[in-house]
Amino acid sequence: MSANKSLFVVNPVAAGGKTEGAWPEIEKELRSLGLDFDHRVTEAPGHATDLARDGVAQGYEMVVAVGGDGTVNEVVNGLMEPGGTRAEATLGVVITGRGSDFARTIGVPSDYGEACARLTGDRTMTVDLGLVEFQSEEGRRTRYFVNVGGGGFDGEVAHRANRTPNFMGGTIPYLTSLVTTLFAYRNKAVELTLDDQEPIRVVANSVVVANCQYFGGGMKVAPDADPNDGLFDVIVIGDIDKIEFLMTVPKVYDGTHITHPQVDTYRAKRVEVRSEEPLLLQVEGEVCGHTPLTFEIIPAALEIRV
């Protein structure tokens, strides 16, 4: 293997299966650009993490996620050693999936040709990562994330959205799931601890812990989040009623929701979320467990080819 060879991890079921059809075109573009690469195709949820980890062990300099935000998350978890402080290879991104929220923040083009061309350059960005510890059926587990994690209503919406046909893209399934989930959801009592401060007790709709700005297919949930500042932006949506919530949703797309009196914002390196009733956790739009949750920032942990 040449010293600078890249590995592409392709998720064929991303974007409702459209990635499988798009990959030959992407592969042709990469070869026309003269990029030296191999590729592997995922076969099941979680497989991208294994493939990325194998790629690191085999000495690939860059591992490229081809799919949506969920594929990116799986690859990131393969690039990081458990308990590690820095990824062991550079991340590349070619977004084909329904979610492209991470790409929006870091400026990766949605156009395949442009995204592939960026991968042949030498421009990189170093970003922080989040690590969340959560409860699962198998006990306590941890997961790295680069974009956004959260507990509560947004976890319930992600759970429903992931069972919705995704041929329409990211925004419509998410909004449909949001409205459907809202009618049955009850806000819950939450205890929130930021760094070493006294706990904050609040009845909340959602607690969103953001490294980057967007989630839910273009919602600017954390408009001031900076993935290079060593801090999470924490957005707490309080005990808002259903009608007021629906009226506020359009404001999330331009980030003006943070001025609402039921929305509080904080910054912290460590965030603990506890609740008597379980809050469902979503990380990068994938549901993986529930409270109690502990989020920790890992500064300057990931290098991305942009």
Image: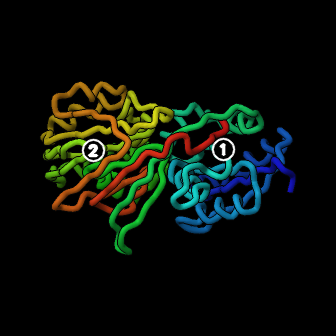
The residue nearer to you, when weighing 246 against 141, is 141
Distance of label 1 from label 2 (alpha carbons): 35 Å
**Residue at x 67% of width, y 62% of height:** 41
Query: Which quadrant would residue 32 be assigned to in this image?
Result: top right
Point out the tag, 1 or 2, that comes first from the N-terminus.
Answer: 1
> Is 81 placed left or right of 289 in the picture?
right
User: Which residue in the rendered view is the most extreme toward the front?
Assistant: 196
Residue 235 in picture, x, y percent from top left? 29, 38
Relative height, residue 54 to residue 2 (above, below): below
| Amino acid type indicated by mark 2 | Asp
Relative height, residue 106 to residue 286 (above, below): above
> Which residue in the protein does label 2 denote?
196
Which is in the foreground here, disc 1 or disc 2? 2
Residue 184 in picture, x, y percent from top left? 17, 55
**Residue at x 39% of width, y 27% of height:** 224
Determine whether the residue tagged by mark 2 lies in a helix, strand or loop: loop
Contact, mark 1 vs mark 2 (Cβ under 8 Å): no
Relative height, residue 22 to residue 126 (above, below): below
Residue 183 visible? The answer is yes
> Is 273 placed left or right of 73 in the picture?
left
> Is 240 placed left or right of 31 in the picture?
left
**Residue at x 61% of width, y 65% of height:** 50
> Which residue in the protein does label 1 denote?
92
Location of the C terminus by quadrant is top right
| Amino acid type indicated by mark 1 | Gly
Instruction: Point out which mark residue 21 bears.
Output: none
Location of the N terminus by quadrant is bottom right
Query: Which quadrant would residue 263 be assigned to in this image?
Result: top left
Residue 113 in picture, x, y percent from top left? 71, 36
Residue 72 in picture, x, y percent from top left? 56, 50
The residue nearer to you, when weighing 128 against 253, is 128
Query: Which quadrant would residue 12 be assigned to in this image?
Result: bottom right
